[in-house]
Image: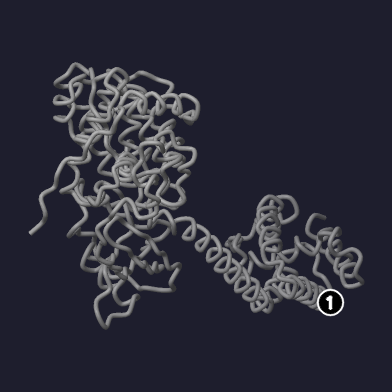
Amino acid sequence: MKPLVKPLGAPEPMSRIQKELLIWYGESQRSLPWRKTSDPYRIWVSEVMLQQTQVKTVIPYYKRFLSAFPAPEMLAEADLQEVLKIWEGLGYYARARNLHRAARELMANHGGVIPERRTLLKTLPGIGDYIAAAVSSIAFGKPHAAVDGNVKRVLARFHKTELPVNDPASGKVFKVAAEAFLEKSKPGEFNQAMMELGALVCTPRNPRCHSCPLARGCRAFKEKGVSDYPRRVKKARIPEYHIAVGVVWKGPRVLITQRKPDGLLGGLWEFPGGKIKDGETPSGACTREIREEVNLVVETKERIARIRHAYTHFKIVMDVFRCTYQNGRVRLREPVDFRWVRLHEIDRFPFPGANRKFIPLIKSHEKDLSTTIQQSFLTTEIQSRLENLPAARRFIRQFCKNNIRRQLPEEEISQLELAFHEVASNIIRHSYRNQEDQRIHIEIQVLEEQVMVRLNHWGKPFTQMKSPPKPVLDGTGESGFGLYLIERCVDQVIYERTPTGKNTISLLKQLKDAVSG
């Protein structure tokens, strides 16, 4: 049975200690944006954000949040997804959801005015005893002590109490002690002084006791026991779970799902996945979880990343896989909504911290993968052009025999045919060896488009055929590839410096003269 918890005593003499603390605060306080306003709304937002979050982390979020929602009515009118997106990365998302709900209640029941009374403040979603006391004292000068972790640590050392600061049963005792210590003529300033003292001087490790304005009355300091306080209840070891998550691709889009509006990470978006069962491989778990969660059959491919992330009561190790859609229609079991989005659209959605850690890796991975696939495709395309050279030779021969006004001698046709083959082979192989796939691909596209324009200029007999073959701009057809070779080889900038090129150009000029003559 737990021992009876008794209230802590009040220090003596009160007035001197309080005065020294306020003097110290006036000289040593940090310049923080929420200390430069008396607006209850802004003070409220800051206190919500500062719960379980460091000041340096809060500052940019505070500024961004108030830039988006400068007054309660703007926050009330906003969509929750917009609020969560602004909050993204700050963690403890129930705070954002409660702020949003409370703003709507303010507009509906209080005319958009934040109540001065602590009891009324505590009726709003997300406002407990600490935030109610902080807002009422700082914004309205009400004499209520605000007790956070910093204040508890100061009081525990000052009184050298054995009460654990992390035991909920001790909360009322620390509250009574804080109320007794409060300078009621300046409650807001005094509350901030106590919190600042805990943050800057009476720190968990290596406290700066010789700089502390309360040192003369601190029992732990006087009895040389500061390092032994505050007392804490030893917590159980935090469990760690192994998670498998899949980035499911369907064409150029990936699948994201939305969590239920309440509970852990409520309302946020994420990639589907779940816990790995005993005896299950991470990739197998990924496939199973996606099937169970969204009713899709996917092929689980390579692992993109392994992410470690800690929550308040547990940790996770997350294996992230690239998956490709195979079949099925999305049917949600646990999520409440889903989207197929392109990667550049993903930043519009609020994601949990664990997902945000690997989203940049997805973008980088897909960029590298896309480059590899493109290079592979282009290499294959160039190789196919080499394989199509015989077809091009046949086209050239047929063109020279049947589609010009003046027949070329057989010897010239053969020379032209061989020259085309040799020049095209050398150019394509050179490009292939030097991995200039992208350059040759772009040149091919440009030149084949030029072929279409020039057909009417020097290919008149060709276009007057009863059933002329249609040029194929991707170069896979005989006429398209042959026309590409004709136009490409005429390009003197590339070929005029080679003997073969000069011979080819000479022959092509004869061909062009014959066609246009």
Viewer-proximal residue, 295 or 264?
264
Q: Could you tell me the amino acid type at mark 1?
A: Gln
- Picture quarter containing residue 379? bottom right
Residue 249: % across, % down: 39, 62
Q: Is residue 44 left or right of residue 224?
A: left
Q: How many marks?
A: 1
Colouring used for the render: one colour
Q: Residue furthest bottom?
A: 279
Residue 295: % across, % down: 22, 65
Q: Is residue 5 left or right of residue 69?
A: left
Which residue is depicted at the point 71% across and 70% down? 435
In this rendering, is residue 508 above or below 285? above
- Picture quarter containing residue 380? bottom right
Which residue is depicted at the point 72% across and 66% down? 436
In this rendering, is residue 212 above or below 187? below
In this rendering, is residue 314 above or below 197? below
Label 1: how many residues lie within 10 Å, few (<14), some (14-19) or many (20+)?
Answer: some
Viewer-proximal residue, 230 or 314?
230
Q: Is residue 401 left or right of residue 465?
A: right
Helix, strand or loop under label 1:
helix
Viewer-proximal residue, 71 or 176?
176
Viewer-proximal residue, 352 or 434?
352
Which residue is depicted at the point 49% across and 56% down? 360
Which residue is depicted at the point 68% across and 72% down? 395
Q: Quadrant of the C terminus?
A: bottom right
In this rendering, is residue 456 above or below 469? above
Residue 386: % across, % down: 68, 76
The residue that label 1 is drawn on is: 415
- Picture quarter containing residue 486? bottom right
Residue 128 seen in this snapshot: no
